[in-house]
Image (tube, rainbow, N blue to C red):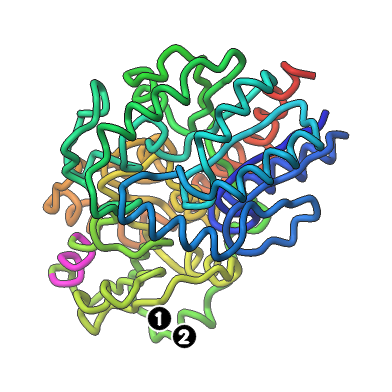
Amino acid sequence: MRILQINTVCGYGSTGRIAVDIALEAENRGHECYIAYGHGTTTYHRAYQIGTYVERKSHNVLSRLTGRQALYSVRGTKLFIRWIKDLQPDVIHLHNIHGHYLNMEILFEFLKRYDHPVIWTFHDCWPFTGHCAYFDFVSCSKWKEHCNRCPNLKAYPPSLVDSTFQMFSKKKSLFTGLNNMIIVTPSFWLSHKVKESFLSGYETIVINNGIDTNIFKPVPTDELRMNLGLEQKIVLLGVSSEGFIGRKGLNYFVELSKRLGSEYKLILIGADRADRKSLSSDVIAVERTDNINQLVQYYSLADVFINPTLEDNYPTVNLEALSCGTPVLTFDTGGSPESLEKNTGIVISKNDLPELLNAVNSMNSVFKKNFSAICREKAVMNFSKSVFVDKYMQLYKRYN
């Protein structure tokens, strides 16, 4: 079977790694795989980059100015469609098609004519809203009827103009009416949202994200702990690929740093310049890193991984922490609690700072000592790359 995946990136970031993991495993099972992507570079051997750097930059600017997302990159998308026609894939597997690299109108008009199986993995809510990838942070439910007068224009993907009414209509027209499409969501939370949207007519399957548990595993951290001067400290860790301001809960980390005792030390990986302005000097703020070995070191070092996310789908960082033997503390937000169970972490009420403080104090370093092995076992059994890829292979078999 010839399988084509389409995503914003290839080989890095959570969605980029997922696409490559699926492709490599499918190849091991005798399939021929390709990945088309928009941004960055990749080492994957059968990759096609859509459009040019200038076209993608122009797309970004125009989308911000007009609020019209995924409606530029005309030339690059037409060339891409020509390439698909030559390739003749048996299955087209979509991931993120937003990100200023692809014209969704040209793509979906082609998909309806091509009439081959389409699998679309939703990594956020963008496909059924008029603008945003998430809406919980602003408590908006307009997407259930028809988006308009958006309260969230500054959120990703940011826009200066409110075109949400028109964009909602455009998406509804384009994304409905495919004869052979299945939607995959990483969380039950997102699956429920899809069923409340204009895409409710499609079959929806839940396949949890997975990680490489052979890479994300407990490693010795004595040297790192000594270098950071943390020999007698209870280490709390937060990780984000997009900074912590807003939906990633920076305010809660700030409050923790103020209210917890001196026996605690907070480390934030992925803190940008704006984040650091709000953090005290006691917090160890580390810039975003794509060095996985470094991430594994910090996950293994931490006594508790804290994820006070205010809107999310199925955060991979929770899985990575558990796989390194570190328990997770998270808000009851989106699909974030779905990766936890008794003895692997604590789920607390969203926005409840006193409950967050109590949970940190109750977990401390003892929780990890008692339950680290259980965290690791759960990750290997449920979130390993082989588990989630095997579910995609079963899905592909329906078309073989």
The residue under the point 54% across, 33% down is: 121
Q: Nearer the viewer, residue 158 or 166?
A: 166
**Does 92 sit left or right of 249 as displayed?**
right
Q: Residue type at mark 1? A: Glu
- Residue 200 position (above or below residue 361): above
The image position of residue 247, as x and y in percent, is 26, 52
Q: Identify the residue at image location x=60%, y=58%.
A: 12
Magenta residue check for 53: no
Which of 188 and 305 lies nearest the eye of the viewer?
Answer: 188
In the rendered image, which residue does mark 2 sit on?
A: 226
Q: Residue at x 53, y 27 (%)?
A: 184
Q: How many marks?
A: 2
The mark found on residue 231 in the picture is 1
Q: Secondary structure at mark 1?
A: loop
User: Contact (CB < 8 A) between labels 1 and 2?
Assistant: yes
Kindly tell me whether residue 275 is visible in this rendering. Answer: yes
Image coordinates for residue 199, horizontal then vertical, percent: 41, 19
